[in-house]
Image (spheres, rainbow, N blue to C red):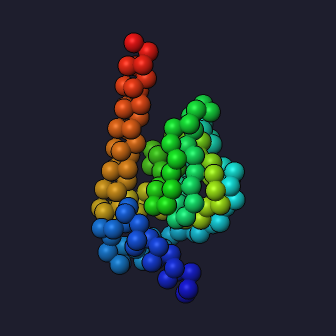
Amino acid sequence: MRRQYEIHTTLSALPMFRHCSRKHIDHIVSITDQVELPAGHMLCREGAAGPECFIIVAGQAEVTLDGVHLAVVGAGELVGEMAPLDGGRRSATVTTTTPTVALVIEGQRFEALVHAVPAVSQAVVRQLSGRLRAQDETAATRRASAA
């Protein structure tokens, strides 16, 4: 019971889940497994199948594509969500850079959660949109530098 209480409290404090009801947080807790990972652990490998996604609770991870640094993600961020949502391969590699605590959600459970809880689907869309904007800005900066 203590584990569920701690995860519930942690999830409730994360921006991604701030619009979720207690009932929805309880549901999320019921479908996650908490893992503690050392620095250097690969959560996702670019091009690999991706049957699960991760909510970073504590710690940080680096996102790379073809070995090029894209971003650093930390507490409250969801990673690895694209592959379970669309059934495709991992679009990037995500490797912990510090000891990290993460919640793992199996792909089918994640997909069902996104369909059942509008606040979660909205949070996922906001996060994906933010990543796309950042990627667009980086590409624009690179084009301007090359000109």
Locate residue 4, reporting x and y percent.
52, 80
Locate residue 47, reporting x and y percent.
60, 37
Locate residue 97, reporting x and y percent.
63, 51
- Most extreme residue toward the top is 147
The quarter holding residue 112 reads bottom left
**Residue sitting at x 63%, y 48%:** 95
On screen, residue 87 above or below 57: above
**Residue sitting at x 45%, y 49%:** 85
Q: Is residue 81 visible?
A: yes
**Residue sitting at x 52%, y 65%:** 57
Give the position of the N terminus as an image quadrant. bottom right
Nearer to us in this view, 131 or 90: 131
So how many labels did they put on this image?
A: 0
Q: Is residue 106 visible?
A: no
On screen, residue 13 above or below 123: below
Give the position of the C terminus as an image quadrant. top left
Q: Is residue 140 left or right of residue 62?
A: left
Locate residue 41, reporting x and y percent.
68, 53
On screen, residue 22 above or below 140: below
**Residue sitting at x 37%, y 31%:** 136
Q: Is residue 87 left or right of residue 46?
A: left
On screen, residue 61 above or below 88: below
Q: Is residue 105 left or right of residue 38?
A: left
